[in-house]
Image (tube, helix red, strand yellow):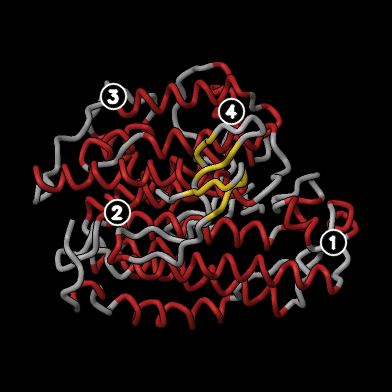
Amino acid sequence: MSVALWVIFPTSEVSTKIGFLDSIREGNRFSDPFKSVSRPQNLVCNNLFNNGQKIRLNYSSMDLKNGGRFSLKSSMVTSPAGEVTLSSEQKVYDVVLKQAALVKRESKSRENMEVNPDIALPGSVSLLSEAYERCREVCAEYAKTFYLGTLLMTPERRRAIWAIYVWCRRTDELVDGPNASHITPTALDRWEARLEDIFKGRPFDMLDAALADTVSKFPVDIQPFRDMIEGMRMDLWKSRYKNFDELYLYCYYVAGTVGLMSVPIMGIAPESKATTESVYNAALALGLANQLTNILRDVGEDARRGRVYLPQDELAQAGLSDDDIFAGKVTDKWRSFMKKQIERARKFFDDSEKGVAELSPASRWPVMASLVLYRQILDQIEANDYNNFTKRAYVGKAGKILALPIAYGKSLVPPPSSRTSTFLKA
């Protein structure tokens, strides 16, 4: 599993010292885990019941005008006992509502975001500046394109994004790095306890301090961070997903969460008339699209680790099984199956693009670059004749260079909601 972040955080891994993993396993404090790095490795819907049978009401793509719900196919599921439970989409949407409400409350009470005093660590206040500098270095090394985009942001915003990037990368490293075999559920429990301390202003180390300082300045909620750790827990025991509802929740945990973390930092354009909820939904959609793209790109690599991140019911409907994936043979059935999976991922990209334009001008370019570049990976899978078993789809250097001006041009377009009177600002 590799995390696909809303902003362009590549699916490379930052390999930490064994002391980092030891500290999580043992619950100890530690200092700087990034001194040595390796090369990259790698909503509310209605349901009707007729004679005990559920009828699903399908919704169209995200509509910024109507609150920004997107691609909702079902929000409730019936158990064998006839009990109604929330679907993954509804659970995630409830989180989106809470995040949007938090930002709206904070924005009303603090129109001009003030910079709070730095968190002073024992010994020297300068450690905080050093922590942010370390975050900058890691971002510059492993997220080059996005890093350049962050330089367009205000100093406070760019430092905050660097801090979030590093925390997400460290979290992903716990279960997806070279020493992942040493990580247990108890270790992740300790990592979550450390997260709680960060949000209480009690950082364990200098990199934690950078995030603690960030969440003290911006209306960032802890829930998406907790949910990402939950995604890491899921990766410890789950290697199959029976349907897209299960896969949707996983994609939210490991990637959609980053969109929710990032919106308060990126900021919404002052002239935007879109609802806060719709912008959060767009951020969620891009995280989901990126992770679905990762999954489709890495089918062969995951299969060699005994993992299949594809909906089992949809594989069966296409006349396929895990055995076909392990065999790694491209057939007409596989091509037909992949076309539908790519179509779904592109739909999430389309939904997300509507919200990127609502971000503050200085934040649009790096996010749009992420969208444009990741969407091209789907094009490369098609160009490889859907052979994602032995061929890795990627965007070459020339493609990246060409994509940047395209993304920049798109980022200059003002929010569509500001050009019409049909939107009401939340």
Q: Along the horizontal axis of the image, is 74 left or right of 362?
A: right
Category of crowding for the residue at label 2, using alpha-carbon neighbours closer than 10 angstroms: few (below 14), some (14–19), many (at least 20): many
**Callout 2, which amino acid?**
Glu
Q: Which mark is residue 200?
A: 3
Q: CA distance from mark 1 to mark 4?
A: 42 Å
**Callout 4, which amino acid?**
Leu
Sequence-wise, which precedes: disc 1 or disc 4?
4
Q: State the SS at label 1.
A: loop
**Callout 1, which amino acid?**
Gly
Q: Which mark is residue 319?
A: 1
Q: Is residue 143 above or below residue 240?
A: below
Sequence-wise, which precedes: disc 4 or disc 3?
4
Q: CA distance from mark 3 to mark 2?
A: 26 Å
Q: State the SS at label 2.
A: helix
User: Residue 84 location, x and y as percent?
Assistant: 53, 35
Q: Residue at 58% x, 19% y: name it.
A: 186
Q: Residue at 25% x, 66% y: name it.
A: 362
Q: Which mark is residue 22?
A: none
Residue 134: quadrant of the picture: top left
Sequence-wise, which precedes: disc 1 or disc 3?
3
Category of crowding for the residue at label 3, using alpha-carbon neighbours closer than 10 angstroms: few (below 14), some (14–19), many (at least 20): few
Q: Is residue 402 above or below residue 246?
A: below
**Residue reaching furthest to the front:** 51
Q: Which mark is residue 21?
A: 4
Q: Between label 2 and label 4, give the one nearer the viewer.
A: 2
User: Residue 114 location, x and y as percent?
Assistant: 11, 45
**Callout 3, which amino acid?**
Lys
Q: Between label 1 and label 4, give the one nearer the viewer.
A: 1
User: Residue 81 location, x and y as percent?
Assistant: 64, 29
Q: Which mark is residue 277?
A: 2
Sequence-wise, which precedes: disc 2 or disc 4?
4
